[in-house]
Image (cartoon, helix red, strand yellow):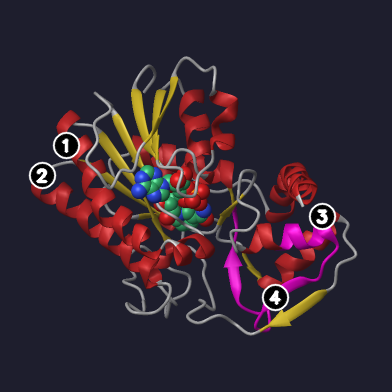
Amino acid sequence: MSSKRALVTGGAGFLGSHLCDGLLGEGYSVVVVDSLLTGRHANLEHLRNEAAFEFIEKDICEPFDVGKVDYVFHFASPASPVDYTVHGIPTLRVGSLGTFNALEVALKYNSKYLVSSTSECYGDPLEHPQKETYWGNVNSIGPRSVYDEAKRFTESVTMAYHRYRKVDTRIVRIFNTYGPRMQLNDGRVVPNFMKQALRGEPLTVYGTGSQTRSFCYVSDEVDGFIRLAKSDEHLPVNIGNPNEFTILECARHVINVTGSKSRITYEPLPQDDPKQRCPDITKARQLLGWEPKINLETGLRMSLDYFRKTVAEESAKK
Ligand SMILES: NC(=O)c1ccc[n+]([C@@H]2O[C@H](COP(=O)([O-])OP(=O)(O)OC[C@H]3O[C@@H](n4cnc5c(N)ncnc54)[C@H](O)[C@@H]3O)[C@@H](O)[C@H]2O)c1
């Protein structure tokens, strides 16, 4: 794959920027197209003088052309509950129009294409753990539907371009991922707990805290994306960490890793909050030889410096 050119839509975001690092590390040249709706220049600052790297600020809901690329990695979309709640309509637009436009680039240049889908396609699952063959339990009109249904539509358009236009597509269903460059205030569990613990504030647990999540460290996740991109699998593949933790256990890990004196407080569960979410990664293991290597405690320790610095910067602004 070396000396090939890859497009990363949404490359200024959390996952996209780590993917850029991974691709550059494998010898690709990389062009990012990002509107900076939820992404940040700071996530790509370290690549500023990298000759093999290029950044284009653009909304991919409008047709775009970056010249010939061998790979299209379509990662543009608000992803955190806070972001897709604020940007409900842009989330639906980028999942639909943006996906058409990214697929048109792949069609034009005969590029391999990989799109970031999500475990949210399974909704509040009635099957546990979730295999790729499970069709999901999604509320199409609830507050989360702007994201869940956008992503289900993204998958549908992707399969249509594969079936009708013969585009060489791949779909990754990403489960909760964490690590450096996450936004501090994005409402997701790890940054929330890290921020509260580092400030010595109580950690907020919604419901009883018995709902479970699985947390994948970002470098494991990127390894999965690149392996899938090199494969010939067109149907969705789960990439996530199958080790399940209750939210309460996660809170205790964060308190332990940060050495915080924070206590835990409880608030009511938000609407449609899934009770359980855990990937079955048998397919990724068999097909890609992939499985996560970094456990939650290690990943939290590896993220600690970033969160410490970001919390300090935020308090300095106040
Ligand atoms: N982080 C996770 O745990 C997770 C889980 C499941 C799926 N995903 C998927 O992975 C992808 C990246 O997520 P993330 O966590 O890095 O989110 P993020 O918000 O950090 O990054 C998304 C990027 O897309 C850009 N973007 C949004 N709309 C755009 C548009 N119209 N045109 C151009 N750029 C646009 C944003 O500016 C941002 O840089 C998303 O598609 C998301 O649905 C992420």
Q: Which residue type carries mark 1?
A: Leu
Q: Mark 1 and mark 3 in contact (Cβ < 8 Å)?
A: no
Mark 3 or 1, nearer chain start? 1
In terms of image quadrants, where is residue 53? top left
Q: Secondary structure at mark 2?
A: helix
Three-letter amino acid code of the residue under disc 3:
Val
Q: Which residues are magenta?
A: 193-216
Residue 242 position, x and y percent, is 55, 60
- Three-letter residue code for mark 2: Arg
Is label 3's Cβ within 8 Å of ligand 1?
A: no
The residue to which callout 1 is attached is 107
Depth order, front residue of 260/227: 260
Q: Count neighbours of disc 1 (C-alpha within 10 A) and say few if under 14, some if 14 to 19, many if 20 or more.
A: some
Label 3: which residue?
A: 257
Label 4, label 1: how far apart the Cα atoms are:
45 Å
Mark 3 is surrounded, within 10 Å at the Cα level, by few (under 14), some (14 to 19) or many (20 or more) other residues, namely some
Measuring from the top left, give residue 147's x and y in whole percent: 39, 65
